[in-house]
Image: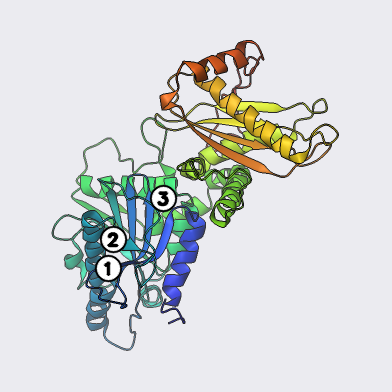
Amino acid sequence: MTKSGVTPSEAYLARLCGTTFLRMWSYPHLYKDQGKKGGGDGKELCDLLVVFGEHLLIFSDKDIELRDDTEIEVAWPRWYRKAVLESAEQVIGAERWLRQHPDRVFMDPKCTKRLPVELPQTPRVHRILTCRGAARACAKALGGSGSLMVTNRELDECKDTPFLVGAFDSSGNMFHIIDEAVLDIVLRTLDTVSDFVEYLTRKEAFFRKLEFVTAAGEEDLVAYYLFHMSPDEMTHDFVLPEEELTGIAIDQGQWALWLGSEQRKAKEKADRVSYAWDSLIETFTRHILGGTQYFENPDIPDKDRGLRWMARENRFRRRLLAESLYECLTKEGAPGQHFRRYHLPQFPGDPLWVFLVLPWDKGSWEYKAYREARRHLLTGLCFVVKYLHPEATDIVGIAMGPPRGPGKDTSEDVLYVDARGFGPTQLEAGRRLHEEAGFFKSPDRREQRSYEFPIDGTDRDERE
């Protein structure tokens, strides 16, 4: 145990998820005030909670050694009961509390700091059990990485079958059991909250669709998922052969095939630029949490709304947006010339993105005036795209200075505009900026035909 009472395993999980999901979504070591008296402590609720729109990801973490000096027929049921069954009960208890008492969730044992985010009224809950201590014994007995075998049977049915974990309790609640051998693989491969939640959602549907599913390990499930696309080609999925099936077995080696595939190599190379988007999120997060953002207005609710929209984008979409923003930042033009661009939503309900790069003419503007002018121009561009696309509901603008050359400025602004309540005044302002000032009259809207797995190592773009 650490000085704070947090196990090394729990601390590692919190750090890993803080990186994977970014700090805006993750809340480790939560408490409830059930039975709390006077100055005493509340009860631990869960090891980690991720809040993402309508989704709640409840983590329970166990670090229990599977003894290899005891017959496996005896050691396995003991380990399974503590690491899986008891952990599942804790998650169900946490879920029940979150549904019944969403306003009584706290960040500290004394229950003085409430969870700083509103929980969804009708959440889609994903129950995740991270368990450690069995990989060495599993690798010794079965070879391979030491990851546990996975099936869609009930949890209780697997308590006497060494190195096999189930998925459902007797009430039909599904659990994702991720052991130490694959925790890094899963969270570093599906390393945005959108990608991870999409995987969990598709896996849950897959496990409920067939009478039986088995996989040599969670990493092989991930690989199978990544190798296949949904019929609309918009997301990965657990696609099945056309013939009617009652079950499927995903054998060992899928993950090795993925690691050696040209698809993975091309994707990882193309994705490198996407991590600039992650860095930008972290920069905005640091300023919001530290109260150091340049434009601070306590009268504006949800001042982190734009940041949350940034964090909702999946890895592929982050690549496209980061590439576009980079192009704006590195364009060369006349002194003081600004560059602008906007992107339409990928799916209904997604935001419309507006990018602005405005150099700082130090000879003409004081820095404060430059920042205010840049913010004003960004707001105007958001009005224009609402005029051009009346269906737009959420608009997020990002403004930056060029990173080098004359007029360089390394600051950045994010602006969220709720366009649902736009009236004649805002729409007229957008019309005038478009018709009279010429904003977005040139081909500033970027239309891309890009591929998650680039063809011949390159993306293909189409522009207006």
Cα distance, mark 3 to mark 1?
A: 30 Å
Does 425 sit above or below residue 143?
above
The part of the image, by quadrant, that contains residue 157 is bottom left
Mark 3 residue type: Phe
* Residue pictured at 58% horizontal, 36% vertical: 321
Does 73 sit above or below residue 331?
below
User: Are circles 2 and 1 on residues that touch, CB within 8 Å?
Assistant: yes
What scheme was used to colour the molecule? rainbow
**Which residue reaches farthest right?**
363
The part of the image, by quadrant, that contains residue 341 is top right
Residue 9: x and y, percent?
Answer: 43, 73
Mark 2 residue type: Arg
Badge 3 or badge 1: first in the primary sequence: 1
Q: Is residue 201 visible?
A: yes
User: Are circles 2 and 3 on residues that touch, CB within 8 Å?
Assistant: no
User: Which residue has dot 1 on it?
Assistant: 33
**Is residue 162 or residue 24 the one in the foreground?**
24
User: Which residue has dot 2 on it?
Assistant: 104
Mark 1 residue type: Asp
Q: Is residue 457 visible?
A: no
